[in-house]
Amino acid sequence: MPKSGKGVDNRAGLELEKVYRGGELLGVLERAALARALLVGVDDLTALGPMEIVLEVTSRCNLKCPMCVRTFQCGGRPSLDMPVEHFDRILANLWSGTERVALAGLGEPCLHPELASMVSRLVESGFPVVLYSNATRLTPSLSDALLNAGLSGVVFPVDGHSPEVYEKYRVGADYLVVRDNVLDFIGRRDALGVDCFVEVQMLKLPGTENQINAYRHFWKDAGADAVRYKADHMQDTGSRRSGICPMPWRGPATIDVNGRVFPCCVQDESSVVLGSAIETSIVDLWNGPIARKVRRDFRETRAKLATCKACEIPLPPVPVSAGGSLLSPFAARRILTASERLLNFFSFLGGKK
């Protein structure tokens, strides 16, 4: 059914919920098992795997964003495209219970010449696919190919509502080109009548605070399903760190361009590597001795894990993390978006006093 072309707040995430992999009851039971493991501190997840996967199909990027971990931590990393034969082997090793595959990482996915084919292969295998793209290389033909391949959703980081602000942070990009590429993608989605959820997000960076209202209205009117104004956790040293991270239990696990598997969304030189998804199934790696040790060390003391010591992503209390694990990744994202709006509203009220 074609979209109306106008974003509606309470629709955020609903389209993705409709298209997520079949076997909904099984998915609920798997999420419940992961939530219980997190709540009571079980390190061995038996036959369970991560509910979410971040798959880095390329480590090449055409921008030099100052707030990106690629710029300030991984600047010397080789620029590579994942070979198709490695992608095929990784696809065969994914866990069938995974409910969301995000094509993201430290590179720009649209630079990979086989991106649309990869999306199609994942969808044919039963995995909902979400693309994270800076939209600089999003041509009309690529947009059509991705939409026709069955893409479930896309996240566009547009950090600013003017050339002056946006191009300060997205170094190497042209604001007007990116804006028009995203608008064209939304228009093509609507014309095709495809259920593809579009999220546009802006980081809370200096200079953006006075643009958020115009930004939100512009993208909602343009047809975006969700508009986020989110904290830059990679450089936010004031985040709360007293809870527990659900990632080593429910994911996302990250598979980098070389097939290495990480137990969370962070990949740098200090990160723990569980093994290779090219050679070993994700379920075996997620339940292997390294993964179990990561979960045990995290519960006992995060000081043992260099990656966790450097991370600034806020940690919710254990019951909240476990409860969030009961939700599908798409429902969790819908609630996250709504909660961010509420927090921004109350922060605004507090600032008015």
Image (spheres, rainbow, N blue to C red):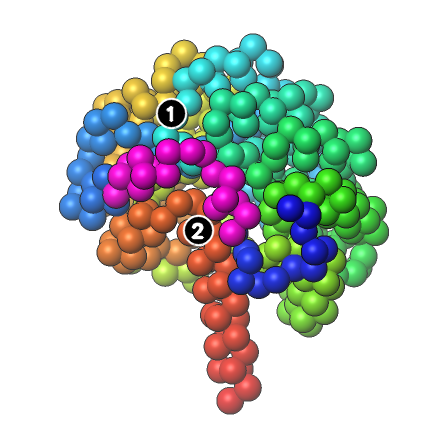
- Image spot of residue 157 (x, y percent): 65, 49
Classify residue 92 by image quadrant: top left
Say above or below: 107 vs 275. Answer: below
Q: Mark 1 or mark 2, which is nearer the start of the sequence?
A: 1
Nearer the observer, 41 or 172: 41
Confirm whether the magenta stretch covers residue 31.
yes
The amino acid sitting under disc 2 is Ala
Q: Is any atom of residue 233 visible in this view?
A: no
User: Residue under circle 2?
Assistant: 331
x 72%, y 29%: residue = 145
For label 2, the crowd category at 10 Å Cα-Cα, with few meaning under 14, some 14 to 19 and many 20 or more, is some
The amino acid sitting under disc 1 is Trp
Q: Secondary structure at mark 2?
A: helix
Disc tally is 2
Nearer the observer, 236 or 141: 141
Image side of residue 56 versus residue 207, left or right: left
Say above or below: 298 vs 214. Answer: above
- Image spot of residue 270 (x, y percent): 41, 33
Range covered by the magenta-colored residues: 14-32
Confirm whether the magenta stretch covers residue 21.
yes
Say above or below: 54 vs 326. Answer: above
x 51%, y 82%: residue = 349
User: Residue under circle 1?
Assistant: 95
